[in-house]
Image: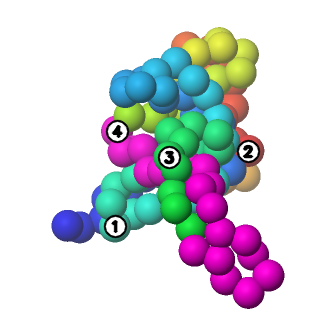
Amino acid sequence: MQATKSHVSKGETVMVIAGKEKNKTGKILQLVPKKNGVIVEGLNMVKRHVKARGNEPGGIKEKEAIIHISNVMPYCAKCAKPVRFRRQVLENGDKQRVCVKCDNTLEK
């Protein structure tokens, strides 16, 4: 499986648009390019049985699982919904991502 270019990046706020966590927002903790997925803070929680190691006690722990990257979209705070974006070139030559609906910048 080949990794694809991502439309979202680490630390960005996204909204889940499909699945059991639909319409929930969170910050991206990690990109998983080999599986075309992202790990979103506080979403898609799963329980894992962990064996005790050294000082860490064992038990059942909850952690975030991967959400497929096609199921998340960048979240625009001004529009308060998931949006598509376009790239805008600034006067100094830099590029930034801008919400298509309201022209609000999506950069972190």
Residue 10 makes an appearance in the image:
no
Cα gap from disc 2 to disc 1, whole angstroms: 24 Å
According to the picture, the residue beneath numbered tag 3 turns out to be 46
Task: Give whichever of discs 2 and 1 has the lower sequence position.
Answer: 1
Asked if marks 4 and 2 touch (Cβ < 8 Å), the reply is: no
Cα gap from disc 1 to disc 3, whole angstroms: 20 Å
Its colouring scheme is rainbow
Task: Give whichever of discs 2 and 3 has the lower sequence position.
Answer: 3
Q: Is residue 7 above or below residue 31?
A: above
Say the numbered circle drawn on residue 108.
2
Residue drawn where x is 71% and y is 21% of the image: 77
Amino acid type at mark 4:
Ser
Q: Nearer the viewer, residue 107 or 10?
A: 10
Magenta stretch, residue numbers: 51-70
Asked if marks 4 and 3 touch (Cβ < 8 Å), the reply is: no
Look at the numbered disc 2 and give the secondary structure of its residue.
loop
Residue drawn where x is 65% and y is 77% of the image: 52
According to the picture, the residue beneath numbered tag 1 turns out to be 34
Cα gap from disc 2 to disc 3, whole angstroms: 28 Å
Residue drawn where x is 39% and y is 63% of the image: 33
- Residue 20 x, y percent position in the rendering: 41, 25
According to the picture, the residue beneath numbered tag 4 turns out to be 70
Q: Is residue 3 left or right of residue 40?
A: left
Cα gap from disc 4 to disc 3, whole angstroms: 20 Å
Where residue 17 sits, quadrant-wise, is top left
Amino acid type at mark 1:
Lys
Foreground disc of the pair 2, 1: 1
